[in-house]
Amino acid sequence: MSNKKAFNFKRQSRHKLNLLIPEHIRSIPPYTAGKPIEEVEREYGISNVAKLASNENPLGTSPLAIQAVMETVSGLHRYPDSNGHALINKISQHLGTGSDNVVLGNGSDEIIGMLTRVLLKPGDEVIFPKPAFPMYEISVRIVGAIPVTVPLKSYHTDLQGILEKITSKTRLVFINNPHNPTGSIITKSEFEHFLSQVSGTVAIVVDEAYIEFVKDETCLNSLEYLDAKSCVVSLRTFSKAYGLAGLRVGYGIMPSALAELMNRIREPFNVNVPAQAAALAAMDDPLFLQKTIDHVHFELDFYYRSLDKIGIAYFPTHTNFFLVDVKRDSQKVFCDLLKEGVIVRSMVSYGYPMFLRINVGSHEENVKCINALERVLVEAKTI
Ligand SMILES: *Cc1c(COP(=O)(O)O)cnc(C)c1O
């Protein structure tokens, strides 16, 4: 088929769908990803765009991981190891868990989806904070279960509020520590009080996508509750501090009986060959990880000092991203920043119409972002 025909076919297929799509699918909110650099460069005819919108690693990827990916190319005709044997062993040794506690995913996004498919039937209830990472709601709706949200309390996860929403239909709770998008943490003692009150029939999933960045010693580490009476599942990822977002590797740590069920529904080859190799190599490069963490904290200080100086309010964070209060329509500020070659995230869709979320980039990118933000807000007479 010629390209042109393929194009026409695509256009026709957009005509009204006469299918009876289930209501729980129609109700799924579309996921909005961070705007890609190429798109902004194309639309505005600019180059050197700084993307500070998806909480990616500001230092790139470990050179060891890049090397490992290169070395896989001669074997790409082979399927990956379906059991992810080497990677699971390495993760479980690193964390001090059993290898039968670890389930690998094509990003932790996939683990979130697998958990909803294993644990839920239509009509079951799932509780999570609002706002939160959009994949919780999307995955819950896909299986016809019912999302029940609990507003954050002073930008923190309201564990008491979650307890109060638990009913006989609740099967699952998602919490996110540190929380995206606010950067707040849950303390160990807050979590222990919560856990002591939760019924054993409710799975508690703690999404720790940013846990590597936390310095506060009172912070919850959910791995400590793997053997608790309640089922506690920890989610971790190679996408952020390990710099492998483009390869998609995440994992869940959970009681082995649940891991066994997860593996039954898992696509057999869900984590591809370069991804497994890169994750293994990334774990052999603790120096890169430490450099990333140090860079993030150093640059957060730079952001805070600069924002204090120009008089823009922000929320101190435990992660590699933070919220700023621009005191006006943040969608507008987002667009103005695009023209300056800086991609951040407007928090309109998270219910914070005047907030932007910015993640730490390279020092040059951070300087560019601060300068652009100051220009845009001075022009708008906000500061
Ligand atoms: C980035 C992120 C993830 C990780 O997603 P991957 O699929 O592993 O890339 C999970 N949860 C939250 C809250 C995140 O921000």
Image (cartoon, helix red, strand yellow):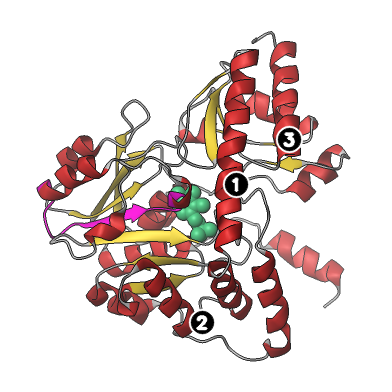
Tell me where residue 325 appears, x and y as whole percent.
Answer: 54, 21
Question: Considering only order in the chain, which callout, 3 or 2, is on the residue closer to the N terminus?
Answer: 2
Q: Amino acid at mark 3?
A: Val
Furthest toward the front, the residue is 287
Q: Quadrant of the C terminus?
A: top right
- Mark 2 in CB contact with mark 3 (< 8 angstroms): no
What crowding class fits label 3: few (fewer than 14 Cα within 10 Å), some (14-19), or many (20 or more)? many
How far across and down, in percent of the image, does residue 221 sit?
31, 52
Give the mark count: 3
Q: Write the residue at 79% across / 31% down.
A: 339
The Cα–Cα distance between marks 1 and 3, rounded to whole angstroms, is 12 Å
Q: Amino acid at mark 1?
A: Ser
Q: Nearer the viewer, residue 169 or 346?
A: 346
Name the residue that disc number 3 marks.
342
Q: Secondary structure at mark 2?
A: loop
- Name the residue nearer the viewer: 99 or 32: 99
Q: Which residues are magenta?
A: 197-211
Camera sees residue 20: no
Residue 5 sits in which quadrant? bottom right
Residue 204 within the segment the image draws in magenta: yes
- The spot of residue 22 in percent (x, y) is 40, 59
